[in-house]
Image (cartoon, helix red, strand yellow):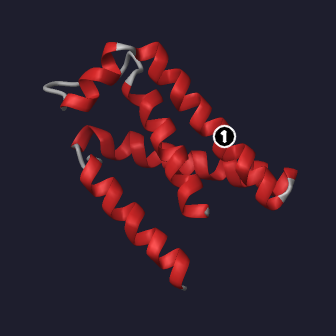
Amino acid sequence: MITTLFFMQLIGFQLWHITSNQVKSTDPALILRSILGNPQRSRTIGGLLILLSTLLFVVKWGWMSGTCAGIAGLMGVGSLVVTLHPFRYISQKTVLLFYGLFLILELFI
């Protein structure tokens, strides 16, 4: 569950980051073109994903621990996205690969 919540935060922050005015995408992928085509909808979806993941952290661990986990997770995924996005290290395949790996580790360890 924790892996899924952090994954939701990553996707939400990635949507916010991609649709910001500071990010200039040259030769975007097909899915990025649809996101950039309607930035307001993408920001709404990203905000809802971040809010939902924080709410589920609060439900899982209580209001203070959940809020702190949501903030700490948002800082972590935010620094990852801002640092790695210009180098194009974050692609759909790598994100899904890492999500699957960490989900397997979470379930079996």
Q: Please state, as top left, top right, bottom left or bottom right, where the N terminus lies in the image.
A: bottom right
Quick check: 48 above or below 98?
above
Q: Please state, as top left, top right, bottom left or bottom right, where the C terminus lies in the image.
A: bottom right
Residue at screen point 68% across, 49% down: 70
Q: How many marks?
A: 1
The residue closer to the viewer here, 54 or 88, is 54
Looking at the image, residue 97 sits to the left or right of residue 42; the answer is: left
Quick check: 3 above or below 105?
above
Q: Circle 1 sits on which residue? A: 52
Quick check: 76 above or below 41?
below
Residue at screen point 45% across, 23% down: 42
Residue at screen point 37% across, 44% down: 83
Crowding at label 1, few (<14), some or many (≥20) Cα neighbours within 10 Å? some
The residue closer to the viewer here, 105 or 73, is 105
Asked whether the viewer can see residue 24, the reply is no
Residue 6 lies in what quarter of the image? bottom right
Q: Position of residue 105 (x, y in %)?
A: 48, 78
Looking at the image, residue 106 sits to the left or right of residue 70; the answer is: left
Residue at screen point 34% across, 54% down: 95
Q: Position of residue 15 (x, y in %)?
A: 43, 31
Looking at the image, residue 71 sits to the left or right of residue 46; the answer is: right
Residue pushed farthest right?
63
Mark 1 lies on a secondary structure that is: helix
Looking at the image, residue 106 sits to the left or right of residue 17; the answer is: right
Q: Amino acid at mark 1?
A: Leu
Quick check: 23 above or below 81?
above
Asked whether the viewer can see residue 31, the reply is yes
